[in-house]
Amino acid sequence: MTMTVTTNADLSARAPRSVNPAHWHQSVGYARQACARVFRDGGSPTDAVAAFGVKAEGVLDWGRAVEIIADALCAHPMKRVA
């Protein structure tokens, strides 16, 4: 099993323009923590992304899983209609 290391500077440079950089940085931290817990429990990147209710296409690595989860945390909540 190989893991690629992505620094905070790399992820901050790829932050979406529509998201506050501080919010993105904090979301990346939460996403890394969530991925670390899933990894520790023997899960895969797909399991980590699925825990946040996001469907991912293709093969995921841990770095991409962190980005997808951070993006989901930064997304504006959708209004629910009764």
Image (cartoon, helix red, strand yellow):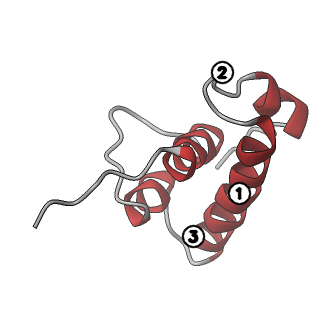
Q: Secondary structure at mark 2?
A: loop
Label 2 near label 1: C-beta < 8 Å? no
Mark 3 to mark 2: distance in Å? 29 Å
Q: CA distance from mark 1 to mark 2?
A: 21 Å
Q: State yes or no: discs 3 and 1 in contact (Cβ < 8 Å).
A: no
Where in the figure is residue 36, as x and y percent of width and height?
A: 69, 66
Picture mark count? 3
Q: Which residue is mark 1?
A: 32
Callout 3: few (<14), some (14-19), or many (20+) C-alpha neighbours within 10 Å?
some
Q: Position of residue 58 (x, y in %)?
A: 35, 32
Residue drawn at x 60%, y 47% is 70
67 to 37, vertically: above or below: above
Residue 20 percent coordinates (x, y): 72, 36
From this view, report whether residue 75 is shown above or below residue 80.
above
Which residue is depicted at the point 45% across and 54% down? 49
Considering only order in the chain, which callout, 2 or 3, is on the residue closer to the N terminus?
2
